[in-house]
Image (cartoon, helix red, strand yellow):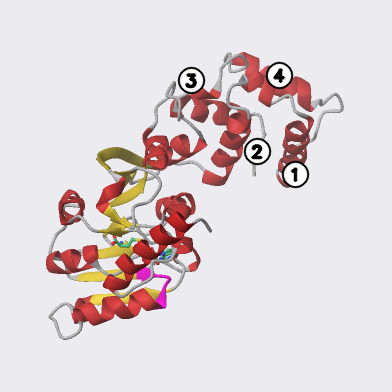
Amino acid sequence: MPKERVQKKSRQHAEVQKQGINFNKEFGQHILKNPLVVNSMVEKAALRPTDVVLEIGPGTGNMTVKLLEKVKKVNACEIDPRLVAELQKRVMGTPYQSKLHVIVGDVIKTDLPFFDVCVANMPYQISSPFVFKLLLHRPFFRCAVLMFQREFAQRLVAKPGDKLYCRLSVNTQLLARVDHLMKVGKNNFRPPPKVESSVVRIEPRNPPPPINFQEWDGLVRICFSRKNKTIGASFRFTKVLDMLEKNYRVHCSLNNIPIPPEFDVKTKVNEILTSKEYDSKRPRQMDIDDFLGLLNCFNSAGFHFS
Ligand code: SAH
């Protein structure tokens, strides 16, 4: 390693040693060191004294202690046992000790406990699976105020026509209202991450839209697999047509519907796509209602995506 890098490394090391902890990059450990950002996130969550809060990755507890001041109970899920010990030490002997419940483990593999609100500066590498875990979680929670990598946050809130509009945007916005709350620079964290961050508010749509999410995601996946192609082009791939035909045959046999001898999946799909001019549309310009309409056309003709 070049000498300067060694020196820089050892300076960083000394810095974290002062805290008594070696932060682990693999777990995305970037502690929020600016109390103004912590306060602001807690404030935006509009917590009530009766609330149960879920926090992901409490780390050394900078946010946890602020949450404990405001609510009845905090369920905090942390993967790193060293940090769990640190956090427990921090609340030991205080009135907050009995309000804090720590779950040690990977939040993606854990059954989430009941919560009213989720507030977290969490590890960015689990952003996507965690958002879907939240959105499909029942019973409904009131809202989530979460810190994400800036680009991920922009994808969550992107609208049709925006550069970052993608499958994540439509899936999230189908199930929730999402708002970008504030930008947070790298220097508010220790050690600073390589990327900029943003805080987002997610509020599940309750009741949820009356559609099968697996079906919806199956369709959206196909549409966005080639984002700049037309819908017509994306549905002309043999793999897609084969899948639709297979599901169609299952659907017909389950519902006792005879399959006409002249049935040809390509012709049928073409009919569906041209009937409402979906054929020439591009997914990056389509809004949620357009995708719902397309799904409805397929489903009414007996075509399914899961
Ligand atoms: N919320 C703290 C720490 C943020 S760093 C603060 O703002 O100061 C991210 C935290 O998430 C770390 O404590 C890390 O150990 C934890 N973590 C990483 N992967 C996790 C996972 N899969 N499940 C639960 N916690 C995780």
Residue 58 is at least partly visible in this image:
no
Q: Is residue 142 above or below residue 82?
A: above
Between disc 4 and disc 3, the foreground one is 3
Mark 2, Cα crowd under 10 Å, few <14 / some 14-19 / many 20+, is many
Q: Give the labeled residue for mark 1.
A: 250
The span shown in magenta is 77-81
Q: Give the labeled residue for mark 2.
A: 304
The residue sitting at 51% across, 55% down in the picture is 2
Whether residue 230 appears in magenta in the rendering, the answer is no
Between disc 1 and disc 2, the foreground one is 2
Q: Quarter containing ligand 1?
A: bottom left
Residue 1: x, y in percent? 53, 59
Element at badge 1? helix
Residue 25: x, y in percent? 45, 61
Q: Give the labeled residue for mark 3.
A: 285
Q: Is residue 192 above or below residue 219?
A: below
The residue sitting at 48% across, 39% down in the picture is 168
Residues at marks 1 and 3, CA–CA distance in whole angstroms: 32 Å
Q: Which mark is residue 270?
A: 4
